[in-house]
Amino acid sequence: MDFTRFNRLLANSTYRELRLRAKEYLQYLNTGGEEQDLAEVTMYNSMVSFLKDLGMEQQQAEDYCDNADNLTELAQYISSILG
């Protein structure tokens, strides 16, 4: 995955929501329960939209985000950039 375009896209105010979803996802990771399920679903949906903005096709973005390791990696990367 090419992360070079992340910084430019994440600097945009429209991605503040994505920052919050990434933090929430990491906070509830491996806690179980309804909070974790909701955090996973919202992170998944946010990331699919984000990857589509980067130029991925819908199915490719969904396939990528279906892998929990990829979703966690993206959440960690976004959190490290946005704090």
Image (spheres, rainbow, N blue to C red):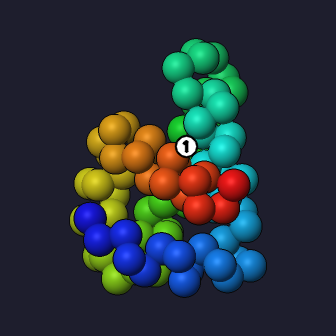
Image quadrant where one finds the C terminus = bottom right
**Direction top: furthest residue:** 32
Instruction: Give the vertical position of 33 relative to 74 (above or below).
Output: above
Q: Can residue 76 be seen in this view?
A: yes
Horizontal side of 45 relative to 38 (left or right) equals left
Quadrant assignment, res 18: bottom right
Q: Quadrant of residue 1?
A: bottom left
Give x and y (percent) for residue 60.
Answer: 25, 65
Name the one closer to the observer, 38 or 18: 18
Q: Is mark 1 on a helix, strand or loop?
A: helix
Name the residue carrying label 1. 41
As rendered, which of 48 and 21 lies closer to the eye? Answer: 21
User: Residue 51: horizontal and vertical position, in percent?
Assistant: 41, 70
12 displayed left or right of 47: right
Viewer-nearest residue: 61 or 12: 12
Regarding residue 44, the answer to whether it shows in the image is: no
Residue 48 percent coordinates (x, y): 44, 63
Q: Position of residue 42 (x, y in %)?
A: 60, 48
Residue 74, placed above or below residue 51: above
Q: Is residue 20 above or below residue 13?
A: above
Q: In this image, 33 relative to 74: left or right?
A: right
Amino acid on which disc 1 is placed: Val
Q: In this view, does 57 lie above or below 83?
A: below
Q: Which residue is drawn at 31% across and 76% down?
A: 56
Q: Alpha-carbon neighbours of circle 1 within 10 Å: few (<14), some, or many (≥20)?
A: few
Q: Residue at x 30, y 42 (%)?
A: 67
- Where, by quadrant of the figure, is residue 2 drawn? bottom left
Looking at the image, which residue is at 60% across and 74% down? 10
Task: Name the residue: 58% across, 16% down.
Answer: 32
Q: How many marks?
A: 1
